Amino acid sequence: MRLLLIEDERELANALSAALAKHGIVTDHTMHLDDAFELTRQNDYDAILLDRRLPDGEGLALIPKLRRSGIETPIIVLTARNEPLERVEGLDVGADDYLGKPFLVEELMARVRAVLRRPPNLAEPSVTAGRMVIDPLHLNVTIGPIPLDLPRRELLVLVTLAKRKDKTVLRSTLEAAVYNYEEEIQSNALDAHISRLRKRLLDAGAGVTIHNIRGVGYLLKEE
Amino acid sequence: MRLLLIEDERELANALSAALAKHGIVTDHTMHLDDAFELTRQNDYDAILLDRRLPDGEGLALIPKLRRSGIETPIIVLTARNEPLERVEGLDVGADDYLGKPFLVEELMARVRAVLRRPPNLAEPSVTAGRMVIDPLHLNVTIGPIPLDLPRRELLVLVTLAKRKDKTVLRSTLEAAVYNYEEEIQSNALDAHISRLRKRLLDAGAGVTIHNIRGVGYLLKEE
DNA sequence: CCGCGAAGGTTGCGGCAGCATTACGGGGGC
DNA sequence: GCCCCCGTAATGCTGCCGCAACCTTCGCGG
């Protein structure tokens, strides 16, 4: 196993390298973001440990750069900036985990192991349908540059259909996506949502149509 | 998106459900480990939020049980037991992340998003027959990129035949696949479905033929 | 090779289940 | 208070599907 450590405190870096070595993990170490980027081009790391505060800037900035260049290696951010909102920030730019300093090496190891258990991240997270770009993770829908504002239940219906575009989605699947098992619906609430969603998509010129498969479910098609 | 929340503090649970709902996430909630296990058998959750200290025992114990039963759903442990070594313990039994109480809902959301950044559904069992690709689970049939729209009963017949292509399917098996026990048929309804299905498959250029085995049943063959 | 009965194939018809649409009102958020 | 979401229900409509009538094919015995 091979990690890339991006960290400017030399003592900490050495201690970490040594500790990881005891677990049979090889560590490459750099203090600079552009070096780090180069290294990821040359080596296929199993994970990246990234400090936020670095001599040449904010470590987080590296993450989108790596992701854009097609590198999906898990990234764990190590930092003293450990306020909850800072952690949110880190995770949302694409980090896989976030660990506040100081930490135990044992915890770091456990988090590395946890991150490595996850399947490699190959999936394109956003879906296009017609003229829309749909991000199922953050529940965003945009048509070109302008966001499409949809009520929550209609949004859930749309995302569920879009994730399986050109394929039928069972009625029961849609119900499960929109309602939890405590909320029971006794009427045609889902149909009503579909109808209102259709109208909104039409008005917005979304470039998709929702078809019904009688007795089975629904299907979203591009025009 | 659908989460399972295993948590005994009702207030926290309600607050979380409400907060997650604002992000368009449907939440099922239970206080009991065995209920939780049952729920995972019945639903396909996107993630599981698990408390450690529960009325019926240590929440962590659920993790190996789920993993052994083949469930790979990401699990985030939520707990007041937030000592580093306890976190190691949690991660090492198979949790994907570990979040100490109290926490901001925003941070939980960010961690959920981080954990979900994984490939969507891996292998979906599908059958090919002629030029069709048939997904028996979601009941959809596509020829190349275009979906084939079939009425429900014909669809059920096709799926049943396709699952055993090149083998005879008993007439009684087909009837069982298309009708439940309450619906009796007194006529040649099944034959009629077969006939209409043949026509539709021909028009669509599906590349299969349905043969009759006199007195026994039917058989689907590729051309 | 022919005749005959039974199984299967095809097709039009009508009932009705399922869907689309829309108006209405309660309720929550700002 | 105002606005919008969303569940409900009434209304109209589409087309699935059971039915049955009629035709075709198959297998068998003579």
Image (spheres, coloured by chain):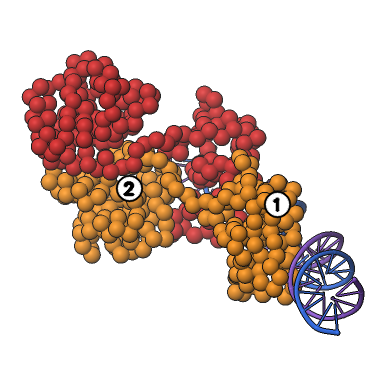
Chain colours: A red, B orange, C purple, D blue
SS of the residue under disc 2: loop
Q: Nearer the viewer, residue A142 or D26?
A: D26
Q: Quadrant of residue A68?
A: top left
The residue lying toward the viewer, choosing from B151 and C2, is C2
- Label 1: few (<14), some (14–19) or many (≥20) C-alpha neighbours in 10 Å: some
Numbered label attached to residue B201: 1
Nearest to the observer: residue B187 or residue A218: B187
Q: Residue placed at 25% from the left, 33% from the top?
A: A47
Quadrant of res D15: bottom right
In percent of width and height, residue B40 lies at 37, 58
Subunit of label 1: B
The secondary element bearing badge 1 is classed as helix
Inter-mark Cα distance, 2 to 1: 41 Å
Left or right of B201, for residue B16:
left
Residue B65 image point, x, y percent: 27, 59
> Which is more foreground, mark 2 or mark 1?
1
Give the residue displayed 26% in from the left and 16% down from the top: A34
Q: Residue at x 17, y 38 (%)?
A: A108
Res A66 → quadrant = top left
**Closer to us: A23 or B102:** A23
> Earlier along the polypeptide chain: callout 2 or callout 1?
2
Quadrant where the N terminus of chain A sits is: top left
Amino acid carrying mark 1 in the image: Leu
Location of mark 2 (residue) = B74
Disc 2 crowd, CA 10 A, few/some/many (<14, 14-19, 20+) = many
Tag count in the figure? Answer: 2
- In the image, what residue occupies the spot 55% across and 55% down? B136
Does A79 sit above or below residue B12? above
Q: Is residue B9 visible?
A: no
Name the subunit of mark 2.
Answer: B
